Image (cartoon, rainbow, N blue to C red):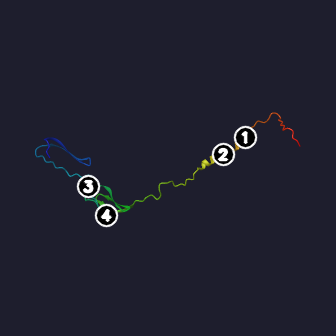
Amino acid sequence: MNVTPGRHQLALVSSGALVWARWLTASEGLRVAVPVVRTACAPRDLAETRIQSGLAHPPPGALCGRWATARAAGPDVELATCTGSVCAPLVAWRVRAPEAPLAPRYVDQGFPTWAKWTTASAVTAILAGVVLVASGAFEAAPRTTRFTYGGLVER
């Protein structure tokens, strides 16, 4: 790589993160030793994992602390948990559909009980009022004697 002589910064970036940086003065024939930098849980650590004979085999030197790998196995998923470059055996992990659709667990009885009692009370009050008005209970008592004549009746 050709660069102009002078002061420069050399930076190594992995997955968008700065992992190493150094200032240097460039001159004719300058050689810079760049370290091999690996970050924990880099895509390479996980992408190169192989699953054979019920065991997960990550590449040697995988730097992830705790991680897992999985594969589809029919209706199930097989899952292995790993620490660094050592993995436990695969375990079947069944994905089950819910036993019932998302529906309420109560039986809808239609008209709520409180509404039944309210309706019965209102009907009772109305009927009692009609009976009282029809019987004349709300009429004022007469202040004088009232005579009624029906005419002559022939016999």
Q: Quadrant of residue 123?
A: top right
Q: Is residue 70 above or below residue 124?
A: below
CA gap between label 2 and label 3 equals 79 Å
Q: Quadrant of residue 150?
A: top right
| SS under mark 2 | helix
Identity of the amino acid at label 2? Val
| SS under mark 4 | strand
Q: Residue furthest top?
A: 143
Q: Nearer the viewer, mark 4 or mark 1?
A: 1
Which is more N-terminal, label 2 or label 1? 2
| SS under mark 3 | helix
Q: Position of residue 4 (x, y in %)?
A: 13, 41
CA gap between label 4 and label 3 equals 19 Å
Q: Which residue is mark 3?
A: 44
Identity of the amino acid at label 4? Leu
Q: What residue lies at 60% left-to-right and 50% top-to-bottom?
A: 113
Q: Nearer the viewer, mark 2 or mark 3?
A: 2
Q: Quadrant of residue 23?
A: top left
Which is more N-terminal, label 1 or label 4? 4
Q: Nearer the viewer, mark 1 or mark 3?
A: 1
CA gap between label 4 and label 1 equals 91 Å
Q: Which residue is mark 2?
A: 123
Q: In the picture, which quadrant includes the C terminus?
A: top right
CA gap between label 1 and label 3 equals 93 Å
Q: Which residue is mark 1?
A: 133
Front one among 2 and 5: 2
Q: What residue lies at 72% left-to-right and 40% top-to-bottom?
A: 133
CA gap between label 2 and label 4 equals 76 Å
CA gap between label 1 and label 2 equals 16 Å
Mark 4 and mark 2 in contact (Cβ < 8 Å)? Answer: no
Q: Which residue is mark 4?
A: 55
Q: What residue lies at 63% left-to-right and 46% top-to-bottom?
A: 119
